[in-house]
Image (cartoon, rainbow, N blue to C red):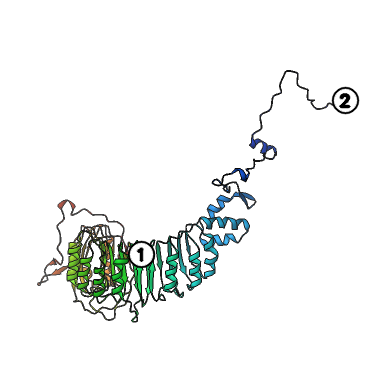
Amino acid sequence: MRPAQEGPRLQPPLPGRRRRRRAPLPLALLLRRGHPPPPRPLLRRALLSPEKKPRPDHDGRTMELGGRAVPVDLVVEVLRRLGPRGVLDAAAVSRAWRDCADRVWRVAEELRLRPAAAGLLGALLPRCAALSRLVLHMESDVDATMLSCLAFSCPSLETLEITMADKAINNMTGEELSRLVSEKHSLSILKIGGCSNLGFLNLSSSSLNVLWLSDLCSLSESVISCPNMSELSLCFTQQSTECTDLVSLMDGLGRSCPNLRNLHISSIQLSNEAVSALEGANLRGLCMLSLILGSKMTDAAVASIVRSCASLALLDLSGSSISDSGVGMICKAFPHTLSRLLLALCPNITTCGIQAATAQLPLLQLMDCGMSLRSNLQNEKQGAYFGEINGRIRLCPKLPTLKKQPMRQKLIIKHDNLKKLSLWGCSAIDALYVKCPELIDLNLNTCTNLHPERLLLQCPNLKNVHAFGCQDMLIGAIKNQVLNEFAAAEPHLPCKRLADGSKRVQLSQFPQEQLPEDKIWIGFKRSECIVHLDS
């Protein structure tokens, strides 16, 4: 029998002949055959220069999810799309999830929270080293603990916004606010609500650009030294005990904030003297000026504004006592710059002043006359009116006025660029004719005396009509005009019988322009319009 065949024997190489070396197998083939990958060469820390330190490599790290290995970078990218509450819940799952959540906090640049306690901010904000924008809607009270957490965290914070819930109280004092502003050297935008406990205002910052403070009350001192500030908004409470000296505040703005462009002050203490102090501040660069709820402001205040401001784009004097003469001064001073004019709650303004404003301001895009043309001041509900400041729609409370407007006023508005018109609560208007091809939003809420047959709307681009509190017949007339495709080509003038009752003729309540013969029977299709019947 033959012996068992042995494996191939290695023959010694012949003399004078070199043995060939096999090429190394690819890494993928080694892994497929079950061989471990070759070890990577280790970098010694002594060989590295101090400028080029090794960065942690997260691309190759994985974590197990449902029995599968998932890259950590993918998990972090998913967590970035969750809200803060979702990231906090994920961090409580395991150590791997907590590491992923920590990476999300480290690179977060914007954070919006509704904290119910200051402890949450104390545990979270120190992790957010790159945070630049923080928006807080506080459901708990604001105290010194939370302000200390904000002061010592987020070194790169640029924007801070704090709003208060209904039952939350802002206990921030003027000293704590001054310390917060002085310690945040990168802070450029600061908006805080519920500032009723400040007591005084003494701010000094070279980086602060925008400052909004609301619910202020009886400030004993008002000093704002911010040379680079461009926008300032101070809203005071409407309590009878409010006694802030606005004259000294206005007088100091010119020296401490010379680059101010947008100014908004809401206070019942606004008067002609305060506006005259603003004239002495020499703020010639103002573009937006809003002085509202100052019933003591008259046409003398308008004269001071005209002398102190060179080119206003927005002017809001809602709640003042200016008259049609003041409106005329505004039209003569800013015919080439003014695009938004808000004159709500001005009882001394009539339809003549409103028509003059729309006729002499060709760039006008927003006109607010809400509650200015009122026939009966008793038994009228208070509400919110349509207004705008800095590009945003805002709501403002109504104050009682003193003058009684005459009944059955006729209002005719023709404008080529007007986009938003508010006649909220103008119960003295009996007839309305609006011809504005660019008009988008029309507010007719609680126009209770507007006659359906004396309404004519020629606005082909109208998108929204607000008709809350109007009569049913008026609502039907509005829908018939804005929802009818052929409304632009059909006459809408009321008819009346002659004395003998033999024939109907049309009453020329408004000047009716003749259409070209080739367009009389052509329907002009308008865009979709929505009639809003809710408040």
Disc 1 to disc 2, how far (Cα)? 103 Å
Residue 33 placement, left or right of 136: right
In this view, 463 is above or below 376: above
Q: Which residue is painted at 40% across and 66% down in the image? A: 191
Q: Which residue is painted at 15% across and 61% down in the image? A: 512
**x and y, in percent, of residue 493 in the image:** 18, 65
Q: Is mark 1 on a helix, strand or loop?
A: loop
User: Which quarter shows the N terminus?
Assistant: top right
Q: Is mark 2 on a helix, strand or loop?
A: loop
Residue 228 placement, left or right of 93: left
Q: Which residue is painted at 87% across and 25% down in the image? A: 3
Residue 8 placement, left or right of 492: right
**x and y, in percent, of residue 287 in the image:** 27, 62
Q: Give the residue type that dot 1 points to.
A: Cys
**157 or 498, which lies in front?**
157
**x and y, in percent, of residue 227 in the image:** 34, 63
In this view, 360 is above or below 235: above
Q: Give the residue type that dot 2 points to.
A: Pro
Few, some or many C-alpha atoms within 10 Å of disc 1 (few <14, some 14-19, many ≥20)? many
Which residue extends farthest right?
1
Instruction: Name the residue carrying label 2.
Output: 3
